[in-house]
Image: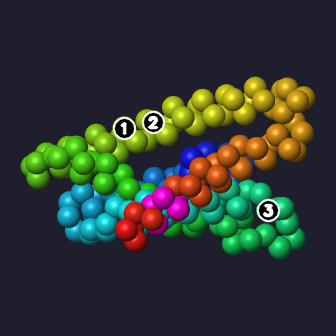
Amino acid sequence: MFVAGLLLFTRDFRTFLKAITCFTLAHSITLSLSALNFIHVPEPPVEAGIALSILFLCYELTRPNNKEQPTLSRRFPWIISFSFGLLHGLGFASALKAAGLQQTSIPLALACFNVGVEIGQLIFLSILLTLLKICSKITFFQKSIFRQVPLYIMGIMASFWFIQRVYIVFH
């Protein structure tokens, strides 16, 4: 959902390419550091932070885009995506560690896992771009209310995940 939000947030290909590259670089860094046991952060706060990052993007997407005084995230989306990418990498590391790999298998598993994440993102983005292209041709979906619905659905889901993860942290 974060990648989908990032695509909707950037709107032009060049800005999206910068933002997604920063996101990939950042999550690769923390994924590697965590998988190689250089850093350790408990899962529930990381997952709560990931949900909050999606919620942040949803909030930014529902705000009017003031071109005269753009927000920091509108001016520098790659900084936002890099920052949140660091957090997402810790979440990816949890998934990789859950596989129960031996220490000798970590470098190869890390490389394969990272490539798999990127391939998954490319497939997801291809499908999303196709759907957006189709919807842009249908008059019914061009009304502003229908453009907001996916954002609110994402926001509701991210809010639920955030509350659920925070509850786990404190119980």
* Image: magenta residue range: 162-166
Circle 3 packing at 10 Å, graded few (<14), some (14-19), many (20+), is few
Disc 2 to disc 3, C-alpha distance: 29 Å
What percent of the width, then of the height, locates residue 66? 85, 66
Look at 20% across and 64% down and name the residue there. Answer: 37
Asked whether 165 falls inside the magenta stretch, the response is yes
Q: Quadrant of residue 109?
A: top left
Callout 3: helix, strand or loop? loop
Report the amino acid beneath label 1.
Gly
How many callouts does the rendering have? 3
Number of the label disc, if any, that sits on residue 116: 1
Amino acid found under the numbered disc labelled 2:
Gly
Is 122 a magenta residue? no
Residue 168 horizontal/vertical position (percent): 40, 63
Q: Are marks 1 and 3 in contact (CB under 8 Å)?
A: no
| Magenta span: chief secondary structure | helix
Asked whether the residues under the numbered discs 2 and 1 touch, taking CB atoms below 8 Å apart as contact, a structural biologist would say yes
Q: Mark 2 — residue?
A: 120
Indicate left or right for 62 with 68 as reference: left
- C-alpha distance separating marks 2 and 1: 6 Å
Q: Which mark sits nearer the N-terminus, 2 or 3?
A: 3
Residue 72 location, quadrant: bottom right
Residue ID for mark 3: 63
Camera-side mark, 2 or 3 = 3
